[in-house]
Image: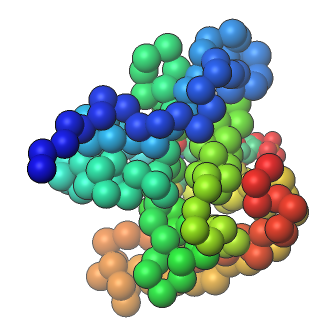
Amino acid sequence: MQTQTPKAGPSEQIEPSHAGGSASGDQALEIRRPVADDGLEVYRLIADCPPLDPNSLYCNLLQCRDFADTSALAMLEGTVVGFVSGYAPPARPDTLFVWQVAVRPAARGLGLAKRVLRSILTRPRPAPLRYVQATVTASNAASWAMFRSLADSLSAPFTSELMFERERHFGGAHESEHLVTIGPIPKEKEAT
Ligand SMILES: CC(C)(COP(=O)(O)OP(=O)(O)OC[C@H]1O[C@@H](n2cnc3c(N)ncnc32)[C@H](O)[C@@H]1OP(=O)(O)O)[C@@H](O)C(=O)NCCC(=O)NCCS
């Protein structure tokens, strides 16, 4: 049976809310699951957010369609301003592995990345997400600060270790990637 694709995924925070910080003013912020129709805007957002590696448009379409439960889109006044792509690795269903986090330059420093990540963590799931993982390059100060701040706000331990190495895994073409692990997230923080 053919079903109609919804224009937008269900919102976690339906009521107009605020990104926090003075620059966001009183503009309405919506954070929701992405749908396939968002894929092209996500692709453009990632292209505007170096040092992120651009994915193929097809990859972003699949993230929005098939990984929507572990991804989230932030819209401000009808414009995509933030996106988190993630998945729960099949062998570690209690872990949100964050593939990419992107916040449009004009919307940075307002707590948006943390807020979008937390919106994924608090979604109802068959089993709660107790860990967040991501890889970060040594030079990405904003990313380190953001994940450390997320760990603090979740009262969860923060560790890091080398995961993908410049020469061995990237053939010299990319900085080494360090695996960041946040967790276990205390139970009382799971749904707050
Ligand atoms: C990294 C990124 C997603 C952060 O988004 P953001 O919405 O500005 O982050 P937040 O406002 O939620 O910041 C969370 C914390 O990180 C800190 N932070 C954010 N950017 C920072 C920077 N450039 N330098 C130092 N600290 C920074 C904030 O001060 C905040 O700390 P606090 O909670 O202790 O006050 C954004 O800068 C970005 O899109 N960068 C380009 C793409 C990228 O590198 N993505 C991450 C790799 S997956």
The answer to whether residue 184 is left or right of residue 99 is right
Q: Is residue 25 above or below residue 73?
A: above
**Residue 189 figure quarter:** bottom right
Farthest residue toward the front? 1
* Residue 99 point in image, percent of width and height: 45, 62
* Residue 153 point in image, percent of width and height: 83, 53
* Residue 155 point in image, percent of width and height: 87, 63
Q: Is residue 106 above or below residue 181?
A: above
Q: Is residue 60 above or below residue 89?
A: above
Query: Quick check: which quadrant has ligand 1?
Result: top right
User: Residue at the spot x=26%, y=55% of the render?
Assistant: 62
Q: Is residue 50 above or below residue 121?
A: above
User: Residue at the spot x=43%, y=17% of the render?
Assistant: 78
User: Residue at the spot x=42%, y=45% of the render?
Assistant: 50
Q: How is the image coloured?
A: rainbow
42 or 7: nearer the viewer: 7
